[in-house]
Image (cartoon, rainbow, N blue to C red):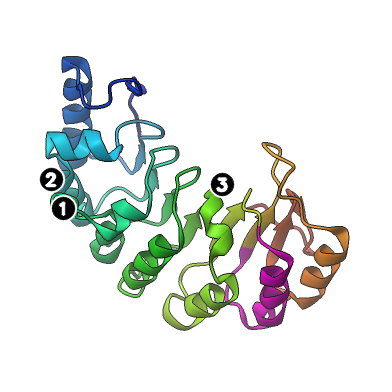
Amino acid sequence: LQAAIPCLPRQEKLPWIISPYVKKKTAEIVHAVINGRFDIMNIEGMFLYNRLINEMLLVKKFHVKLAKNNIIQELNLRNNGLDDTCFIGHEDFIGFATVLAHNRALKIVDLSWNNLGCRSVESLKSALQQNNTLHTLILVGNKELKEMDLASFILFLRDNCPILRRLHLEDIDFSQETLLKVEKVLPESTLYVLSMGASPRTVSTRISPHMIKRLQAASPKKMVLRLNDVCYSYPCETS
């Protein structure tokens, strides 16, 4: 059963004014996490805007209950304005990384098209060290992650989170230097699926044909390497 709750108005012009409708719908989402018995939670592009959550003082309840939830296995938080501030935490903001650290049911987490950066990666790494269920992490379109040390992150997953097998990083404009470092560590990776480069949504993050050949040659035989939305492993598996 999938909990699909209609999108809420963003109220971009007056974000400090929270209408009764938004308050009601946000409370319904929190209530659903606390009491629901669904295994997929889809709250894409909805209510996790810093100002809204902090003013309503619901974030602590939301994150604490979600961390303890043992039913939800797939969580979609795409397009929610999450950024480094969220992961570092304010006085009234525990941070979503806490959920990953303590939850014992989540298997798939989609954080695509937020504003996550390098500090978010550090918080994720700390949480993933304590998590033993998550096998798929989707970070598509988080543009600031182009500055992350991707090679070190791949090695971190090998050493500290071997259960995480699928990493999706499409639509992030990694530099040539970053990709060359990734090439060196790919043979040691424990990932089954690694996706990078452009997707049908954008072409500005395309990886060059030359770099594709180098990454393909370096990847383990067990790995499904998807670059520019094309599968380069054999036999080709779906991701």
For the residues labelled 1 and 2, say whether their Cβ atoms are less than 8 Å apart: yes
The quadrant of the rendering that contains the N terminus is top left
Q: Which residue is tagged 2? A: 61
**N-term mark: 1 or 3:** 1
Q: Is residue 135 above or below residue 142?
A: below
Q: Amino acid at mark 1?
A: Val
Task: Residue 160: give x, y in percent of width and height.
Answer: 42, 80
Secondary structure category for the residue under label 2? helix
In magenta stretch: residue 207: no
Task: Give whichever of 83, 108 is nearer the camera.
Answer: 83
Question: Which residue appears at 21% of the width and 29% of the height?
Answer: 26
Q: Which residue is disc 1 drawn over?
A: 64
Highlighted range, magenta: 174-193
Q: Which residue is mark 3?
A: 141
102, 73: nearer the viewer:
102
Badge 1 density bin: few <14, some 14–19, many ≥20, Cα 10 Å: some
| Cα–Cα gap, marks 2 and 3 | 28 Å
At x 69% / y 43%, what residue is drawn? Answer: 199
Vertical comparison of 28 with 21: above or below: below
Q: Tell me, yes or no, whether the highlighted magenta stretch contains residue 186.
A: yes
